[in-house]
Image (spheres, rainbow, N blue to C red):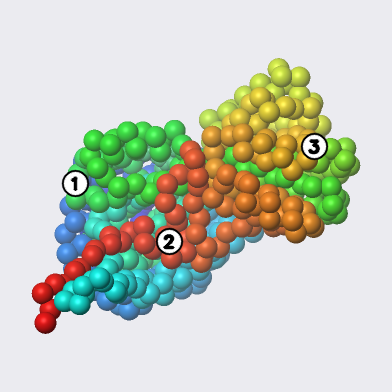
């Protein structure tokens, strides 16, 4: 099935009305990969028209019917894994192994929601009157605008699209223009599976006007947004005028608290992999490493050794751990953060420069930075790049105070072999996702959402399904 890099509206691949096209750049080589159709607000309104019309019938189908289509879409992804993972590496730069893993999770998410849609149970509530019966049912919301970030080109859209479609909603999707190839493949999966025209519409388009169209058109009942806190705030401002509902999955600045009762070398080695997954461009990336003062030197030395061994290069090369950053802009912002920490007199223990064997591509040799305090830019900002800053702490209270000292509240991690410490730290952290002795505190079946400036609502798990359903109380009175 061909997308010809176009928009997918009302069951057809079409050029943007403006005929505008932009280049897609390979971040590992800086070469043009292909050109893609780039739409605007006019295309968005066409997509909303199609989704609103399709909602009339899609919302009336059974979850069993929808599940069959979703499961076929999941299987399409599994059957085409080689091709779709290859294209994800081309456009995102991430290592092939990570791309294959991400597509596998995307397929699993779609399959999981296919089944979970069948379990959108309401409830019957006993009332205080003998002549009255009350129950709550769940109904699909309507047209959902889904805007997603590039860092997980298939996972980010898949978790929102699948939940919304399983709930009986129709979708106008606007993934990032940095990773359209994955979005075309995901769309093709649903087309091949037999999704009716208009149920899923894909726009690769100018973000701000499309976001405005989604806010302004009252047929769009919710915007599900995965991206930066900055843009999340823009949408919140807009929604305050239009009453559009929002699900917001925003930025993070995850602390990692490592107590002095752990196997330091093993944790340092694991940290060197976890921190640099997808080049640190992960909203739940372990970012600020708080190390107990008794093991600070030992941990810092070990982690520096392991980080220096990471292999940087093209995602297609065997054994590469770290690819390029997504764009020159993203690369520049990470180098700028590093320059600011140098001005703060921090010490760069390894990395932080263009790898000597790579003269093209948006790369940075993974860096470890020490000699930092809480006011450092590396403590206060989301880094979204290959820098691992190490800080020290004195005791549990000190660790919690420092870890919670951020406007973000997405993920946090702690490592300890003491049960009391594990419970106290997990209860004291002001974050929506806590990993104790593990780096992957997420899963298709688990709720994923942030506190504070990191978001509103949840994706994944049954919570992710209910984000796209309205609750309705039905109360029947006057019974004899
Ligand atoms: P971004 O906010 O710049 O862009 C995200 C999406 O929003 C893109 O599709 C973009 O085109 C669109 N967009 C940009 N301006 C817009 C506007 N004015 N109106 C409507 N849409 C607009 O973020 P990014 O740089 O692409 O992604 C990185 C950010 O995403 C990081 O902060 C990261 O933590 C966050 N993120 C969060 C999660 C999560 O689940 N919490 C997951 C992935 C990424």
Mark 2 residue's CB less than 8 Å from ligand 1: no
The answer to whether residue 241 is seen in the rendering is: yes
x and y percentages locating residue 355 in the rendered image: 73, 35
Q: Circle 2 sits on which residue?
A: 463
Residue at 47%, 60% in the rendered image: 460
Front position in the image: 173 or 231: 231
Write down the quadrant of residue 211 in the picture: top left
Q: Residues within 10 Å of mark 1 (few under 14, many from 20)?
A: few
- Left or right for 168, reference 385: left
Q: Is residue 410 above or below residue 168?
A: above
Identify which residue is drawn at 36% across, 62% down. Answer: 466
Residue picked out by circle 1? 218
Residue 168 % position (x, y): 28, 66
How far separated are the C-alphas under marks 3 and 2?
37 Å
Picture quadrant of ligand 1: top left
Q: CA distance from mark 1 to mark 2?
A: 24 Å
Q: Label 3 belongs to which residue? A: 394
> Is 341 situated above or below 117?
above
């Amino acid at each position: 099935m061909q997308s010809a890099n176009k928009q997918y509206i009302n069951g057809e691949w079409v050029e943007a009305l403006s005929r505008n096209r932009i280049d897609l750049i390979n971040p590992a080589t800086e070469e043009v990969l292909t050109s893609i159709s780039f739409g605007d607000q006019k295309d968005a309104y066409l997509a909303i028209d199609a989704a609103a019309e399709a909602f009339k019938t899609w919302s009336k189908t059974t979850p069993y019917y929808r599940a069959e289509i979703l499961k076929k879409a999941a299987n399409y992804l599994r059957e085409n894994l080689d091709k779709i993972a290859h294209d994800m590496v081309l456009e995102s730069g991430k290592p092939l192994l990570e791309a294959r893993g991400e597509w596998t999770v995307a397929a699993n998410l779609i399959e999981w929601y296919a089944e979970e849609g069948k379990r959108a149970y309401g409830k019957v509530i006993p009332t205080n009157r003998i002549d009255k019966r009350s129950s709550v049912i769940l109904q699909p919301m309507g047209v959902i605008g889904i805007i997603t970030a590039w860092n997980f080109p298939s996972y980010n859209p898949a978790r929102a699209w699948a939940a919304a479609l399983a709930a009986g909603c129709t979708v106008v999707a606007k993934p990032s223009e940095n990773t359209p190839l994955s979005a075309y493949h995901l769309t093709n999966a649903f087309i091949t599976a037999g999704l009716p025209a208009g149920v899923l519409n894909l726009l690769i388009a100018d973000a701000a006007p499309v976001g405005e169209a989604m806010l302004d058109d009252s047929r769009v009942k919710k915007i599900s947004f995965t991206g930066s806190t900055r843009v999340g705030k823009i949408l919140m401002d807009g929604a305050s005028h239009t009453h559009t509902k929002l699900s917001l999955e925003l930025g993070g600045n995850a602390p990692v608290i490592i107590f002095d009762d752990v196997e330091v070398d093993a944790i340092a080695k694991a940290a060197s992999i976890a921190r640099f997954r997808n080049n640190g461009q992960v909203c739940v990336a372990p970012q600020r490493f708080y190390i107990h003062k008794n093991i600070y030197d030992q941990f810092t030395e070990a982690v520096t050794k392991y980080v220096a061994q990471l292999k940087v290069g093209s995602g297609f090369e065997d054994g590469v751990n770290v690819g390029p950053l997504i764009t020159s802009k993203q690369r520049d912002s990470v180098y700028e953060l590093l320059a600011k920490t140098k001005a703060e007199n921090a010490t760069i223990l390894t990395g932080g420069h263009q790898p000597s064997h790579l003269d093209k591509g948006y790369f940075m040799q993974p860096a470890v930075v020490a000699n930092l305090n809480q006011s450092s830019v590396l403590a206060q900002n989301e880094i979204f790049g290959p820098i691992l800053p190490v800080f020290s702490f004195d005791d549990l209270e000190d660790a919690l105070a420092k870890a919670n000292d951020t406007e973000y509240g997405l993920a946090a991690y702690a490592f300890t072999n003491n049960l009391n410490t594990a419970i106290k730290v997990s209860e004291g952290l002001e974050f929506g996702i806590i990993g104790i002795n593990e780096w992957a505190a997420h899963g298709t079946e688990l709720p994923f959402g942030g506190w504070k400036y990191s978001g509103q609502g949840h994706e994944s798990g049954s919570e992710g399904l209910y984000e796209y359903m309205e609750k309705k109380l039905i109360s029947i009175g006057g019974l004899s």
